[in-house]
Image (cartoon, rainbow, N blue to C red):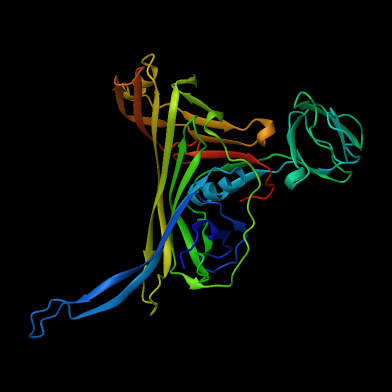
Amino acid sequence: MTKLSRLTKLAFAPEATSGTYLAPSFGLPFDKADYEDVITELRDESYRNNDTVLQGLYPGAAHSTWSIDVLAYPDLMGHWLRAMIGPDTVTAGVSTTLAAAVAATGAVSISTTASIPAGSTIRIGTGTLAEYAITGAPTGAGPYTIPITSPTGGLTKTHLSGATVVSASTHTFKQDGGAAKRTFSLSVNDTTNAVRGYSWATLSDLALKIDPKGAVSCSLQFVAMPGVEQADFTPSYVDQPPILGWQWAMTNAGAASTRGLTLDYTIKRAVEPVHGSTGVQAPREIFAGALTSEFSYSAVFENRVDLELYERYRQMPTVATLTQPVHLGGCSLALTMSKSGYTKGTRDLSNAYVQAAFSGSGIYNATDGGAIAAELKNFVTAPY
């Protein structure tokens, strides 16, 4: 019987040991996904006194490939940044609870058992009861009174005493050639109840698309071990809005810019399944090489500032920062190339207004510790 694609279950777990399968920890909400067990075709075309070329066909070395398109959900983004760029240095936010209930909507302060620094973005409650706010200067010696400075009308929900209150954590991802690469176990039930697990899934391509007219999206490409039958699972999905394109702020040519129309990043590592003398069809390991970071940027062409980055080969910082308003979660993502080179500049006169398209690359620099660095603020307190 024909199956409904929307009933597919796809999930993943960060591996403690690369190649050792783990049952899923996180559901993976996707817009598009395809995968293949790649088996090398070995052909016997020997001469055997007949007029046929193919005399035999045999299975060679095997691995798998995955291509998955997902929206940029803040809690999931950290996994992809850790796998592609490098280790996460986390500055954990405050985790506390309400010392008193919020009995009515419109509250302009809360009482907590631990202090929270002024200017913090906080999440009160969990699941459907969660809401987000920005705090003012705390007072008291415990319990602490925490003013709510945003939303301006105060809190929009009521909360029980003891409800969790967490301030945002900051995750900084930088390259480290000596650190182990993050790998994943991917699990899928493709509606046929043939549940398969794919270990040592190594991210080879991370493409981010930023367009103010849409949600920020990620295209992920993995190389993994061949699929192995596993137990069925029930995925648990994130309950948060994705980062949206209109939340994008651009800095290049030494200043903030409102000219940006679209920005696409392509971050890659050459990933190779290494087949050794193991006596098995699957790879000995999956190896990830060095990183490259490229971008494509389209902009309103109202002056020559962007174009001179190309014409003069001025290698200046390029920074894209996306910040959710507090009512949409208050998370943020910043992608920084402290040294970037613009390698192409094209002017387009065919639209209603003049536009320009640029290509460029991130260049190694000591500030980023590589070609690109990322800072993610969300409510995950542990390092990725």
Q: Position of residue 328 (x, y in %)?
A: 66, 35
Q: Please give the name of the residue rendered at 54% of the width and 69% of the height, measured from the top-left corner.
A: 20
Q: Is residue 125 left or right of residue 261?
A: right
The relative height of residue 156 versus residue 224 in the rendered view (above or below) is: above
Depth check, front residue: 21 or 196 = 196
Residue at image point 11% right, 85% down:
48
Residue 222 visible? no
Query: Residue 22: in sight, yes or no?
Result: yes
Up the image or down, 356 lies above or below 21; here it is: above
Percent from the top left, x then y, of residue 314?
37, 24
What x and y, as percent, mark residue 319? Answer: 49, 30
Considering only vertical position in the picture, is 54 above or below 335?
A: below
Please give the count of numbered marks on the rendered protein: 0
Residue 207 position, x and y percent, is: 43, 43
Query: Can you name the residue that lies furthest to the top here?
Result: 303
Residue at 64%, 37% in the rendered image: 331
Please name the residue shown 42% across and 60% down the image: 35
Q: Is residue 63 left or right of residue 54?
A: right
Q: Viewer-proximal residue, 373 or 70?
A: 70
Say which of 60 and 179 sits in front. Answer: 60
Occupied quadrant, residue 53: bottom left
Spot the residue most to the front: 1
